[in-house]
Image (cartoon, rainbow, N blue to C red):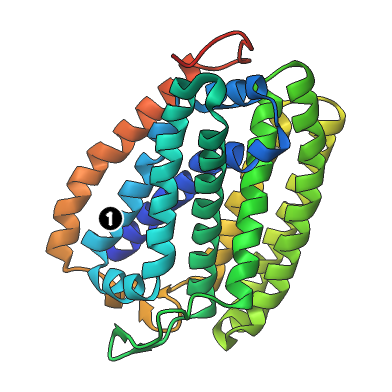
Amino acid sequence: MAIDLPIIWAGIIAFAVLAYVVLDGFDLGIGILFPLFPHRHDRDVMTNSIAPVWDGNETWLVLGGGGLMAVFPLAYATVLPALYIPIILMLLGLIFRGVAFEFRWRAGPNSRLWDIGFWLGSTIAGLMQGMALGTLVQGINVQNRAFAGGAFDWLSPFSLLTGLALLVGYALLGATWLNLKTVGELQARAHRLSFIFCIGLVALIAVVSLWTPFIDPIYFERWFGWPTAFFSALVPTLIAGCTLLLWLGLQRERNLWPFLAALGLFVLSFAGLGISFYPYIVPGALTIEEAAAPDSSLAFLLVGAAVLVPTILAYTGYSYWVFRGKIDPEESYH
């Protein structure tokens, strides 16, 4: 049986993007939550909770973006011009966020401006990621296998909605992470915020899910045609299950449940996107097979991925294992 290399690589890149969203999502969420925790000591503990892992989490963004360029160059060349502005803003947000993360410790009592920078960088990065996703879902103008739209096609009511949904989702991940990793009043506040952001995210998921099938007939057929309707119905059912698990975990103070359930909401939403997109990599314009590089290139790169991906998974898992458990409020990052 012949190996379908484009499909294998589409799976690898999809996994890298999902890993970035769920892993970097909670530490972006920490920054988004900063204004709700005004005391410096609380903010120090919040950043301590992600200090050992936040740099490694961004590895998946490099793998996903670099993999897309190498493996699906036509898709990369088509999508990038449509998303120049949000991608540049996202990268600037990530850069400024990283600088602020380090400098706030050096600034000591005068760290308020760097705290604002950390919040602003995290918020802009999350918002732009969500808006870029919304732009892909609503479709980009492609003619003769090249982007033919305008510089601000990414700015639309639907992309603003998806941007807001991702911000709220990241805030939920951040709140459930703090509920898992911290103690005392900080944990109690994160616990209360988790309820609020859970309601907000589920409501936004519902609105986006109801809107999406009517954007394009392809999406409508994926969600309501047979036999895909069977799998489409499974996703909202599982989302309801994750929501219930998250809620019960918060009520019963099972601190790990809410975080895992919040991750489950992201995984299931990502699966819903897969149902809508497949077999397209640029919805309505380019399929996975059409956008792929030659099989010889895919096979060569797959050898590297077979070594690189397990290595990243191993050191990521080891980092989380070493730094498991609650954060000591008196510990310092440096």
Residue 232, image x, y percentages: 66, 68
Label 1 packing within 10 angstroms: few (<14), some (14-19), many (20+): many
At x 42%, y 44%, the residue is 96
Q: Is residue 45 left or right of residue 299?
A: right
At x 56%, y 40%, the residue is 116
**Is any atom of residue 254 visible in this view?**
no
Residue 233, image x, y percentages: 71, 66
The residue at the far bottom in this view is 143
Relative to residue 256, is residue 305 depicted above or below? below
Which residue does the numbered mark 1 point to in the structure image? Answer: 67
- In this orientation, which residue lies closer to the viewer: 299 or 190? 190
The residue at the far right in this view is 251
Relative to residue 162, is residue 56 depicted above or below? above
Quadrant of the image occupied by residue 41? top right
- In this orientation, which residue lies closer to the viewer: 102 or 234? 102
Q: Check disc 1 and give the amino acid type.
A: Gly
Q: Is residue 208 left or right of residue 149?
A: right
Q: Quadrant of the N terminus?
A: bottom left
Q: How many marks?
A: 1
Mark 1 residue element: helix
Residue 40, image x, y percentages: 63, 23
Q: Is residue 249 left or right of residue 96?
A: right
**Is any atom of residue 55 visible in this view?**
yes
Q: Quadrant of the C terminus?
A: top left
Relative to residue 224, is residue 34 depicted above or below? above
Relative to residue 218, is residue 162 depicted above or below? above
At x 49%, y 18%, the residue is 321
Residue 318, image x, y percentages: 42, 21
- In this orientation, which residue lies closer to the viewer: 287 or 258? 258
